[in-house]
Amino acid sequence: MYEDQDKIHKVLISLTIEKALLDVGKLIYENVVNTLEKKYHCTIEDCYDHPQYLREILDSLDKAGDVILVSLKKDLDRFRNIDKIEEFLQCIGQ
């Protein structure tokens, strides 16, 4: 059962990241996806286990990165009672 919950949390975070990126723009989304792939050999889904990758990329985006971080916090805040989501938010600095 724990494994199923972990998969659900991973999907929740992945979709939330995708939404936040696309809300800023398709070019930002593509930039982040490409950087994840080229620099870390991973996907948005892998940010669940490695939020520091996402944080580093967002830091390089200046104001757009700040907007994305605020959006992630807003959308995930109600799930802070879930340890892994709280850890994710803390790692990205929210």
Image (cartoon, rainbow, N blue to C red):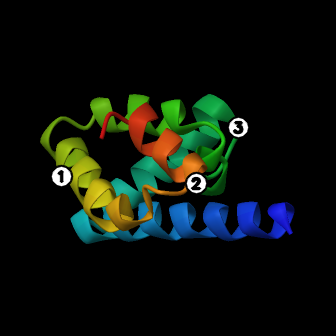
Mark 2 neighbour class, 10 Å CA radius: few under 14, some 14 to 19, many 20 or more: many
Q: Quadrant of residue 4?
A: bottom right
Q: CA distance from mark 1 to mark 3?
A: 25 Å
Q: In terms of depth relative to the viewer, which is nearer, 13 or 57?
A: 13
N-terminal of the pair, mark 1 or mark 2, is 2
Figure check: 85 above or below 89: below
Taking 47 as reference, is 6 above or below it? below
Residue 66 in percent (x, y) is at 19, 43
- Residue 35 appears in the picture as rendered: no
On residue 44, which mark appears?
Answer: 2
x and y, in percent, of residue 86 in the image = 47, 46
Identify which residue is drawn at 33% across, 60% down. Answer: 77
Q: Which residue is mark 3?
A: 41
Secondary structure at numbered mark 1: helix
Q: Amino acid at mark 1?
A: Val
> Hey, what amino acid is under mark 3?
His
Viewer-side residue, 36 vs 67: 67
47 is higher (above) or lower (below) than 57: below
Disc with the residue nearer the chain's start (1 vs 3):
3
Decide if residue 6 is on the left or right side of residue 29. Answer: right
Q: Amino acid at mark 2?
A: Ile
Residue 80 locus on image (x, y percent): 43, 55
Say which residue appears at 86% left-offset and 69% top-offset: 1
Q: Nearer the viewer, residue 76 or 26?
A: 76
